[in-house]
Image: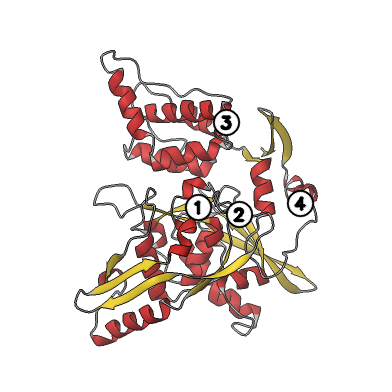
Amino acid sequence: METPENNKPAALVAQHNALINARFSFVPLQMRLFLSLLSRIDFDDTDFQEHFVPLSELVNKLDGGSAYEQVDEMCKKLTQFTLYIEKLEEGTRRRRKRPNFEYIPLMAKAEYRGDMGGVMAIFNPLIMPYLLQLRQSGNFTMAALDELRKLKSPYSLRIYWLLKEYADFGKRTMSVDDLRFVLNIGKEEYPRFSNFKARVLDKAQNELAGTDIPFTFELERENQVVQRIKFLLQLGTQGATKMPLPDGGATASEWGAALAAVGVSRRSVEQIARQLEAEEYDLGYVDFVLARILKQHELGKVKKPAGAIYKALVEKYLLGEYHESQQRTAPQKSPAPRVRIAAPVPDSEVAYRMSEVREIYDNPGPFMKQRARAATFEQHVQDIYLPDGFVVELRGGEEWLVKR
């Protein structure tokens, strides 16, 4: 996930979803250092490294000693910075059905180095499960670094990640207390909801309007008091289904339908389309990944093929094997590979695996008190999805929630 050179695709960064839902709050300087350190982590890293971050990545204008003093003070406070975060299962790094939480220091070191003109910093090893080797858990969210760096407010950054986690669902509802808790905003700060709305919600909406996660929101009241915020993501559909592909290959609608048929979301298909357009790999790699992951799914080695297919394409970790397979068959030139279509999926269809909806219900995040929701998962589906037009369908022996 390192920062790309010029003319290369935008860098991607990732966090475990438990970290996205942890309780903490940054100031702007801390936020920028956090992003800079994230950009220096690679998916294959097994340990944290100490990194140098130049002042130019942290401070917009180097206007004398005040900027240096602010960075030095920021480093001092960051070494005392703690997260209130959900503990993961040992070994699997998965979230527990009955979450427990603990306080963990974020940094092992953050030191301003005037002689070098920047900061030397390294994350605390205790948060390794939340930032390293994330494929092991499968419970993480990725974002483009360029999109994150458009945000100025730390609250906007936190809300971006909270919504990005639910991008495939198109919406996320949080109680006001839950959101205050995650953002570490006490009752004494913005005690009037109108102030909270103006300083946090409206500001985030304005900043995220310029990113890939624009949103609107609805306020849900009880006895005239705002209790919940329903975030509605305004995710575009352009690009993925209309993108031109190399001559002789499958049409965009064919490969897009093939991915959708195995559960890859439209938003994820759009990301894959951008990579194809940037020529990070060719359409044959899409076919190669589909065949490989679906075979592993048949053998019981992969439980969630949609997520595994998306990660293999976006992170390109099977690309080396694909190129080797191409070299072995190079003497015989054959037509460009076509993606097999498991079943046609209408462009207007929205489909979620019931198992993935259940996982989100079971793991709502580290909230101070139980969020208002149905007592059972079955009632949750009845209250949230069925009134919204979803129906339950059986596909490949697995239940799905489908809306057309």
Q: Quadrant of residue 274?
A: top left
Mark 2 vs mark 1, CA separation in Å = 14 Å
Disc 3: CA contacts within 10 A as few (<14), some (14-19) or many (>=20)? some
Q: Residue furthest front?
A: 90
Instruction: Say which of marks 2 and 1 sits in front.
Output: 2
- Which residue is disc 3 drawn over? 261
Percent of width and height locating residue 401: 69, 40
- Residue 285 occupies quadrant: top left
Please, is residue 248 above or below residue 42 in the view?
above
Provide residue 30's location: percent of width, then percent of height: 40, 73
In the displayed structure image, the side of residue 384 where residue 216 appears, left or right:
left
The residue wearing badge 1 is 141
Q: Quadrant of residue 281?
A: top left
* Residue appearing at x 45%, y 57% in the figure: 131
SS for tag 3?
Answer: helix
Q: Specify the label residue 204 is tagged with.
A: none
User: Which type of secondary structure does the marked residue at label 2 adopt?
Assistant: loop
Query: Against 86, is 200 above or below?
Result: below
Distance, label 4 to label 2, CA atoms, is: 20 Å
Camera-nearest label, 4 or 2? 2
Marks 3/2: CA–CA distance = 28 Å
Q: Are marks 4 and 3 in contact (CB under 8 Å)?
A: no
Crowding near the residue tagged with mark 2, few <14, some 14–19, many ≥20 C-alpha atoms within 10 Å: many
Q: Position of residue 359 (x, y in %)?
A: 65, 49
**Residue at the image position 50 percent from the left and 61 percent from the top:** 160
Q: Earlier in the sequence, mark 1 or mark 4?
A: 1
Q: Badge 4 is on which residue?
A: 380
Distance between the alpha carbons at the discs numbered 4 and 3? 25 Å
Q: Which residue is mark 2?
A: 95
